[in-house]
Amino acid sequence: MLQVCRDAEQWRAEGFLKDNHPADAFLEFWHGYDAIPDPAREFKFHPKRRWLFDFAWLDQMVAVEVHGATFAGGRHVRGTGFDKDREKVNAATAMGWAVFEVTTTMLRKDPAAFVSQVSATIAGR
């Protein structure tokens, strides 16, 4: 089980997520827990497509995709964008990647649970 540090609790109380991009919020939470190692950012995982993972742990083939603006009609929830995201995640899965997807709401609601899932998967690979 991950232990929350005082800075992460303070981060949550101060509403860091409200004022920052969700990807930055995830990374800040990742650093606020005893989750290691640090991920690569904006990693191009596919040999032919220009697809990027928001965060990737290369040796373990684990990735995190952060989706913001899910309730504001953002790209990830509109028809074409949603379809393209599924194509990307399916291709990554076929290549052996474990891909976790998180929304702003999920980070706001229970970031420790999400970080714990990702951390446990990294440790198990």
Image (cartoon, helix red, strand yellow):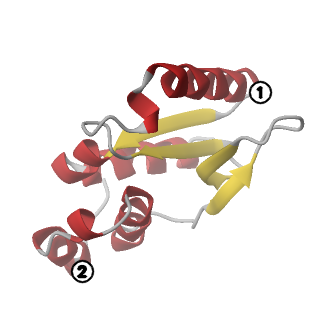
Q: Position of residue 53 (x, y in %)?
A: 63, 47
Q: Is residue 100 left or right of residue 48?
A: left
Report the label total. 2
- Name the residue: 44% across, 58% down: 23
For badge 2, the amino acid type reads: Asp
Q: Position of residue 83 (x, y in %)?
A: 55, 19
Nearer the observer, 70 or 73: 73
Nearer the observer, 81 or 111: 81
Task: Report if residue 58 is visible in the image.
Answer: no
Q: Residues within 10 Å of mark 1 (few under 14, many from 20)?
A: few
- Name the residue: 56% across, 22% down: 86
Q: Which residue is mark 2?
A: 7
- Name the residue: 30% across, 53% down: 1
Q: Position of residue 33 (x, y in %)?
A: 34, 67
Q: Indicate whether 38 appears above or below 55.
A: below
Nearer the observer, 58 or 121: 58
Q: Indicate whether 28 appears above or below 111.
A: below
Q: Which numbered tag is attached to residue 95?
A: 1
Q: Is residue 100 left or right of residue 95?
A: left
